[in-house]
């Protein structure tokens, strides 16, 4: 073992935040396979093999995508498989995003019963919320999650989830880089 490896067992931590985030994405791409949209639980089973921090990152990535492209209520229409939902909620807590985890839990309680057994004829999540008279409730959750999903970094708005990844790996590298 070299002196450098003994003094810094995780060389990725010497990178700046942007480079470290890229490293985390590369790790996830290399270690995570499967289809996050699957409803058979196979994706959640793949994530369960990862170290806790990396698992949290892999699960919360899909929520970040939903918050960027759609909303938290829509998220459950795409990623409502119970195992992945549980890992996403656990991941938010592991990463210290407790307010977003709380909002996610509220959205889960609202959306999963509405989407259970959904058919194509039922329409999309927004149509279902509208039909059930819950559009305003869903919109309030969407607005709250949208705000919680963003952070300000020197005047630049960026993902609170990805910022939490970088913070987390600097605090707990052994929970990310473990085999």
Image (cartoon, grey):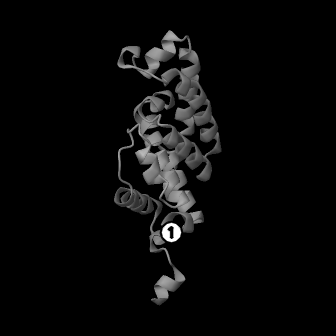
Can you give x and y, in whole percent of width and height, for residue 131 in the image?
Answer: 49, 10
Nearer to us in this view, 176 or 117 = 117
Q: Nearer the viewer, residue 39 or 168?
A: 39
Question: In terms of secondary structure, where does tag 1 sit?
Answer: loop
What residue do we see at 52% from left, 52% from top?
Answer: 56
Above or below: residue 108 compared with residue 31: above
The residue that appears at 55% across and 22% down in the rendered structure is 138
Residue 125 figure quarter: top left
Question: Can you see residue 85?
Answer: yes
Residue 104: horizontal and vertical position, in percent? 58, 35
* Mark count: 1
Q: Is residue 156 above or below residue 20?
A: above
Q: Position of residue 178 (x, y in %)?
A: 50, 69
Please tell me which residue lies in front, 36 or 138.
Answer: 36
Q: Is residue 29 left or right of residue 154?
A: left
The image quadrant that residue 167 belongs to is bottom right
Q: Measuring 35% from the left and 53% from the top, which residue is drawn there?
A: 33
Residue 41: x percent and y percent?
44, 43
Residue 166 visible from this viewpoint = no
In this rendering, the answer to whether 68 lies above or below 26 is above
Provide the residue designation for mark 1. 178
Crowd class of label 1 (few under 14; some 14 to 19; many from 20; radius 10 Å): few
């Amino acid at each position: 073992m070299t002196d450098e490896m003994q003094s810094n067992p995780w060389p990725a931590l010497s990178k700046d935040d942007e480079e470290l985030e890229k490293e985390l994405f590369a790790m996830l791409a290399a270690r995570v396979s499967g289809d996050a949209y699957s409803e058979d639980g196979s994706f959640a089973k793949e994530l369960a093999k990862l170290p806790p921090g990396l698992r949290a990152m892999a699960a919360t990535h899909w929520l970040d995508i939903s918050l960027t492209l759609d909303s938290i209520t829509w998220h459950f229409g795409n990623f409502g498989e119970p195992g992945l939902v549980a890992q996403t909620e656990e991941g938010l807590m592991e990463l210290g995003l407790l307010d977003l985890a709380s909002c996610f839990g509220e959205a889960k309680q609202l959306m999963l019963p509405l989407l259970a057994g959904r058919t194509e004829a039922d329409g999309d999540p927004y149509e279902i919320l509208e039909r059930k008279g819950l559009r305003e409730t869903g919109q309030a959750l969407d607005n709250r999650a949208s705000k919680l999903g963003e952070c300000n970094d020197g005047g630049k708005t960026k993902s609170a989830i990805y910022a939490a990844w970088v913070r987390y790996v600097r605090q707990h590298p052994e929970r990310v880089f473990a085999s």
